[in-house]
Image: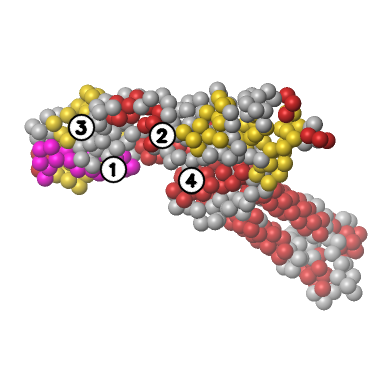
Amino acid sequence: MASRCLLPAAGALMLMCFLPAAFVVLPGVQTPALHDAKAQGGASFANLSMASIATTTAAFGVAAAVARSRSREGKTAAKYTTQTILPSLAWIKTGARASELQPTELKALTLAGNDVLIGKTEAGALFCVGNLCPHIGTPMSEGADVIGDVIVCPLHGSSFKVTTGELIDWCVSPPIIGPLTGLIVDKKNLLIFECRQGGFLGSGEVEVLVDTNAKKAYEANYWKGLLDAQGKDDGKTLQASCAPIFPMASRCLLPAAGALMLMCFLPAAFVVLPGVQTPALHDAKAQGGASFANLSMASIATTTAAFGVAAAVARSRSREGKTAAKYTTQTILPSLAWIKTGARASELQPTELKALTLAGNDVLIGKTEAGALFCVGNLCPHIGTPMSEGADVIGDVIVCPLHGSSFKVTTGELIDWCVSPPIIGPLTGLIVDKKNLLIFECRQGGFLGSGEVEVLVDTNAKKAYEANYWKGLLDAQGKDDGTYY
């Protein structure tokens, strides 16, 4: 970012040391530059190279940087936003004619980001509905049946009126499993789209009225949810990478711009070349100080501009460092360390449990019935239920409070997997592979074990988890090329 925004201005400042520019003329004041150039054999002409050409060049550099900033801002801001997107309805041609569709035939299309399904009822009436079942998003085009004016989802048998989207039956098949899956999602009607036959007397293509902003609105809700979950949806997060003219230009370019403005007012004719007499002070005396003000384009402005550029670069690098440290998709290696828990073993009773978060790791320290100290992961490997919320310790076995999965606290070995409640517990166990419980090494610190309990944890575990999260998110969008952040 610094190279694109600041180098044009920095290059202009460098030119100020070499380009002759003593052409500033004040009304009624004789400009000494050309006169001195002749008198001094051209040396003073080079000595006074701090004026309008360099200023103009620097202005072009700043303008180019601002233009680049604005172009990047437009592209990024258009791609990511959390603002409310209003609907924009339009009739979109489907490329299909009603005469080509047979009764009960269906055709899936994507129109301006909307997944739609056009078809005909048994009576031959044209309709258009959303292609995704409102239960779990099953494509209705993958085997849905049209019975009269009702469409039936091929997966769980949910049925809807194609004319109104009204729900008729919700997850009726297969027996037991279908109704159980229906319990986890609120009942909803099917999405309906208005459609018509275009052309003269309906002889043209089928047209569907869709919201052309639907995809943008969906993505805005996605980003808003993602940022809200991280407490970052403050209206500024998504502008950090695109950085519009304000605040980016104000932070990166205004120091240099301010320095350029100073060049028009500050006296700076103090550049001295070896063996050459500097005419500035001489002319200041001869002209009553007028030429001294006229030659205000030298080292003071250059130094001020250099400080401005240096400050902008420092700010840019500071922001870059913070962001790079916060978000990464690189592989994070483990870093093991003994962390004190703040609890003493003597304070824990047999079968008592205490949940802690140590360097981003959710752990559960406790004692077996025999009083042996142990430390395990607090989250059940089934669906992440906190074991601290009612787990039982029986001997050296810990039992998950939700589905009754049990594990050895010494090795994490799985004993039983989702045994309760009957039917539902085993069914939920089928959707997740069986896993052992995470185990942490622990010890009693202090002299002769009289200190706090200490646990050996990976202090980079949270960073590694977040790296995998971002990698998955970017891979899904085809953007994990190593340069995104």
The answer to whether 416 is drawn above or below residue 259 in the figure is above
Q: Earlier in the sequence, mark 4 or mark 3?
A: 3
Cβ atoms at labels 3 and 2 below 8 Å apart: no
Q: Earlier in the sequence, mark 3 or mark 1?
A: 1
The label nearer to you, 3 versus 2, is 2
> What is the C-alpha distance between the residues marked 1 and 4?
25 Å
Residue wearing tag 3: 152
Residue wearing tag 4: 473
Q: Which residues are magenta?
A: 100-119
The answer to whether residue 100 is seen in the rendering is: yes
> What is the C-alpha distance between the residues marked 4 and 3?
33 Å
Q: Residue at x 56, y 51 (%)?
A: 329
Q: Quadrant of residue 31?
A: bottom right
Camera-side residue: 249 or 285? 249
Mark 2 burial class by Cα count in 10 Å: few <14, some 14-19, many 20+: some
Amino acid bearing label 4: Leu
Q: Earlier in the sequence, mark 3 or mark 2?
A: 3
Q: Earlier in the sequence, mark 1 or mark 4?
A: 1
The label nearer to you, 3 versus 1, is 3
Q: Is residue 8 magenta?
A: no
Residue wearing tag 2: 429
Residue wearing tag 1: 111
Q: Is residue 112 magenta?
A: yes
Mark 4 burial class by Cα count in 10 Å: few <14, some 14-19, many 20+: some
Mark 3 burial class by Cα count in 10 Å: few <14, some 14-19, many 20+: many
Camera-side residue: 345 or 10? 345
Decide if residue 83 is on the left or right side of residue 440. left
Q: Earlier in the sequence, mark 1 or mark 2?
A: 1
The answer to whether residue 241 is seen in the rendering is: no
The label nearer to you, 1 versus 2, is 2
Decide if residue 24 is on the left or right side of residue 81. right
Secondary element at tag 2: helix
